[in-house]
Image (cartoon, helix red, strand yellow):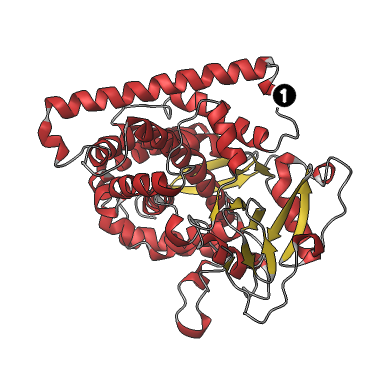
Amino acid sequence: MENTITAPAATRLRTVDSLPGPRPWPLLGNLPNMELRHIHQSVEDWSKRYGPMFKISIGKTTTVVLAGHDLVNAVLRDRPDGFRRPSITAQVSNEMGGRPGVFLAEGAAWRNQRRMVMTALAPHAVKAYFPSLVSVALRLQRRWRQAARDGSAIDLTEDLKRFSVDVIAGLAFGSEVNTIDGGEDVIQRHMDTILPEVSRRSFSLFPYWRYVKLPRDHHLDNCVRELDKAVDELIATARVRLAAEPQRRERPANLLEAMICAADEGDSGVDDVAVAGNVTTMLLAGEDTTSNTLAWMLYLLQKNPAALRKAREEVLRIAPDTTAFTIEQMDALDYLDACAQEAMRLKPVAPFLPLEALRDSVVGDVQIPKGGLVWCVMRNDSVSESHVPQAGQFDPDRWLKKGDGAMDKHVSMPFGAGVRTCPGRYLALLEIKLTSAMLLSSFDIATLDTVDGKEPEELMAFTMSPVGLRMRLRERVASA
């Protein structure tokens, strides 16, 4: 059965072969013209040349690129019935021994896991864990205060990653991990190996690892085994706590316990394998995405003094005392929330999303066959003057306007769209506002830049991260 997403009934349909696009190389397709570290930028550049729909070839596989936000939005909203993540990604994950969570699950499995994850990440549930978030933010404050007193430079991306790891370990699993003060989290170390390998293998022209394994592949196998072992121990420990204290099922103390309780409901359709998969998924969501968004936002604020001043004024008016932060204060930081939205518009940590058609479909006026691949460009219209006035400027106020001048929120979709919108959206924004409020109330940013003063490189691995950001802080005096 063919599914038509946007084409009027009378529209004459085009085929994928008829689409324009860069000329492919024999066997290699357009890969010689792309660098995996910056693959998103190559496709974005082609979008400016070929328009909202064109084709590229990754090896011998033809992919339809969707750069118009209306097309992207329509396809995202046709999930999970019309489109899924590419089967090659799931295949690579399965070969590595991965246990899919809600990120990679499809169909009925996704629906069952989604219900469990949404229960664990609902705003009222996250609010119960807020004191744990504050304690980690204060730990980061102490680290940065010492750096300010020493006059030393802070590796911003690395410190924010440590913050995110400590938050997700305590909030999600009830485990006290302190990487901020120099400790090590074994799970995070293995994830740092596994996630880039998923991306690298997904774009590989030939799956050599199925026939011969290099040292990096043996190292990967060991990381997967150790990660599975660590996650299984977390689940077993949580089940022991729940058995010893049955009242915890009424008020789970962390997200892992909440997921286990939801999974144990008679009609959940979810077992501990699915719980384990979502533990891994939450590590991904809790580390790279939030920490990189925070780094980009702080960099953009530093480059825009008027916005930085306005953000600090809001924090000092609403939440001036870091030791007395409340969830209500964080929810009231509207301008800081707008800063996060603007940063994600300009620097989305997921700048593209590949999908696979589950049935014959029509997108725009193009026939997409079942099994056909589409590449959703998440940063095209969102940085185009035709859709966003002064699109290249960092202007958080655009997100606060009402009426005719209001920002079209469908142009920028950092958390996706439709029923598969990121379930951790509230938690991510809460982490971002909490950390930013701590910084702005406690410190002045002396410098925040790369060593050479150039805009930081956009490194694409599993997410898009800034490279080489160093920050120097000055402590603020109480009367400031």
Looking at the image, is 479 positioned above or below residue 463? Answer: below
Which residue, as the protein is rendered here, is positioned at the far front? 1
- Viewer-side residue, 108 vs 477: 108
Per the image, the residue denoted by label 1 is 208
Left or right of 75? Residue 205 is right
The residue tagged with tag 1: helix, strand or loop?
helix
Q: How many marks?
A: 1
Give the image location of residue 8, x and y in percent.
62, 79
Q: Residue at x 50, y 31 (%)?
A: 150
Left or right of 257? Residue 177 is right
The quadrant the C terminus occupies is bottom left
Left or right of 132? Residue 201 is right
Q: Residue at x 33, y 56 (%)?
A: 330
- Viewer-side residue, 236 vs 211: 211
Looking at the image, is 197 positioned above or below residue 361? Answer: above
Give the image location of residue 274, x and y in percent.
37, 35
